[in-house]
Image: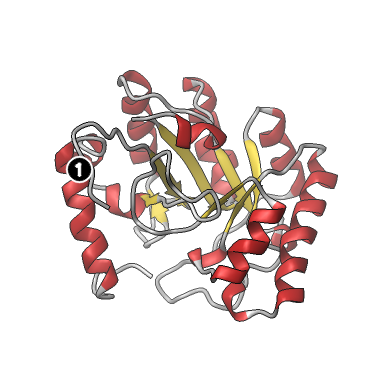
Amino acid sequence: MLYTSTVRPSAILTFHSLDPSGSVISVAPELFRRQMEWLASSAIPVVPLSRIRDSPGAVALTFDDGFRSFATAALPVLLEHRLPATVFVVSGYCGRFNEWGTRGRSVPRLELMDWSEIRQAASASVEIGAHGVSHRNLARLDPEQVLAELRTCREVLEDKTGASVRAFAYPYGASAPAVREMAAREFPICCGTRLDFVTAQSDRADLPRLDAYYLRNWFWYRRLMRPAGRAYLAVRRWLRSLNCDGWY
């Protein structure tokens, strides 16, 4: 997407695990703290996910899968700096590991939050979002299976936390027109993994996000919302489209 000088795009950042492994889904805890400290001290507004389309130049923070490191490493930093965030939880794997059958070799075996930790996050005003029951690729399922993944995940999360679940993230960012149509009927906001910024015209059924994998370099992280940062991510998006960018 091209942006004119009058358009101030926003960004949804996607984190997964905070650990020192260096894997494609990992950000070192000390780097995350530094990133959040800089963000909190900057002039960039950090807003809840529900407000991102209507907040030009803002950032929203999301965390996929519900890793235990969110509770131990991310939540204390977010609370310290009063930064809102959304955690997308795989309801069928809470308290277990990320062993959903399609984990690549470059992704380590990691613990996921249990229900008490998820409730603690919810009580700290973290938004709990849905990420499916089993982390399956919804584009490969039949409509009945897709609906079950959407509805069961939401119902279980709401039952366990007592909070309304209004956001969904497609596992692997994978969807199809029919999947997005069903998801949009179940959730006001749905997030994909298309590497792009957000504007008021962005599709609520498939909001683009910027994965933290591309922002581990401090130089580019600090320039995220500047023209240079947008140019850098455009190049990474092109490389990703060629499947030669090192990311799944």
Residue pictured at 24% horizontal, 74% vertical: 244
**Residue 223: quarter of image:** top left
Vertical side of 199 occupied by 172: above or below: below
Q: Give how far across and how far down residue 164 sits, in percent.
A: 76, 39
Please identify the quadrant where the C terminus is shown.
bottom left
Q: How is the image coloured?
A: secondary structure
Helix, strand or loop at disc 1? helix
Taking the spot 75% from the left edge, 52% from the top edge, the residue there is: 154
For mark 1, what is the residue?
229
Residue 137 visible at all = no
How many numbered circles does the render carry?
A: 1
In this orientation, which residue lies closer to the viewer: 186 or 36?
186
Residue 224, quarter of the rendered image? top left
Position of residue 111 in the picture relative to residue 37 (left or right): right
Q: Position of residue 208 (x, y in %)?
A: 42, 52
Q: Is residue 102 left or right of residue 149?
A: left
- At a point 16% along the width and 39% down the height, the residue shown is 227
Q: Position of residue 51 (x, y in %)?
A: 52, 32
In-image side of 5 versus 64 (left or right): left
The picture places residue 201, in percent across and down from the top left corner, at 42, 44
Q: Relative to the observer, which residue lies in front, 114 or 169?
A: 169
Residue 55 visible here = yes
Inspect the image, locate mark 1, and give the three-letter code of the amino acid beneath it: Gly
